[in-house]
Image: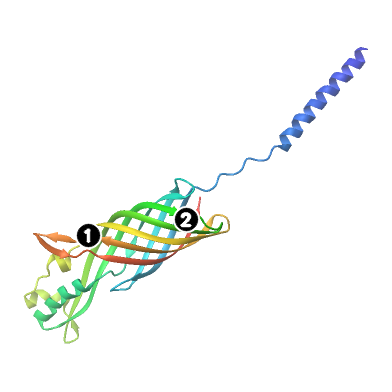
Amino acid sequence: MMRLVRLVTCFGIFALTGVSSARAQAQPPAASAEPRWYGEVTVGPTLGHKSDVSVGAEGGGRLTKMLDVFAETGHMGNVGNEDLEARAQKIANFIGGTVGSTAYKANYFDVGVKYHVPYAVKYHPYLSIGIGFASITPEVTFLVNGTDVTGQLPSFGVQLGSDLSETQTRPLFMIGGGIMYDFLKRYFADVSYRYGRTSQAESDGEVVMQGLNTQRLQFGFGVRF
């Protein structure tokens, strides 16, 4: 009788162990969390009165399924306008020469939010808006008889004012949109358009730089993590 009890007890322990093991194996593995953050690099042309190249970087994270927060920074090679050319032309007329080149070089930084428009699985249209600042530096050159005399302007009795020589840091408002395309699980391509507007700069009650309109067509490559 005791031997039978022992056999039943051993069988019960073995059965319970087997059931527990089967249950453990039957439970599906925990699903890995979706990537929350992202980073990307961008490059593309600037558009408008002057065209050049912009390069930049952007990073951000998901607030909700359809809303991201982001920060971007970069450099625009030339966002010059007609006002800058007119200011340079006054100097060229005074020295009896011509304007060689004009440019506003801009470094920018802004933070904002990005709204993802519901669409297909791999394509993610979005709208973005941001605020920040831009550090804008004027660069002008002057020619006399085909020779660059920019560095010799004092000999012509000319000293460039702040409107043609000093960097101005101005508030920046940005609005844009684009489409992201996912591939290889964590990577994505990004094509976007960004419009920016800076406020005008004043010195001693005079406008030394008008508000600038900037436009960027960007092509980006990024990763989610």
Q: Which residue type carries mark 1? A: Ser
Kind of residue sitting beneath label 2: Val
Which residue is labeled 1 in the image? 199
Query: Residue 112: x percent and y percent?
Result: 36, 52
Q: Which mark identifies residue 40?
A: none
Q: Position of residue 36 (x, y in %)?
A: 49, 47
In the rendered structure, which disc, 2 or 1, sits on the residue that comes first in sequence? 2
Label 1 SS: loop
Q: Position of residue 68 (x, y in %)?
A: 43, 50
Q: Is residue 46 above or below residue 175?
A: below
Residue placed furthest toward the right: 1
**Residue bearing mark 2:** 117
The foreground one among 149 and 90 is 90
Q: Is residue 24 above or below residue 142?
A: above
**Is mark 2 in CB contact (under 8 Å) with mark 1?**
no
Where 148 sits versus 203, above or below? below
Please report the residue visible at 79 percent of the width from the left and 30 percent of the height from the top.
Answer: 18
Q: Which residue is at the front of the view, 29 or 95?
A: 29
Side (left or right) of 154 relative to 65: left
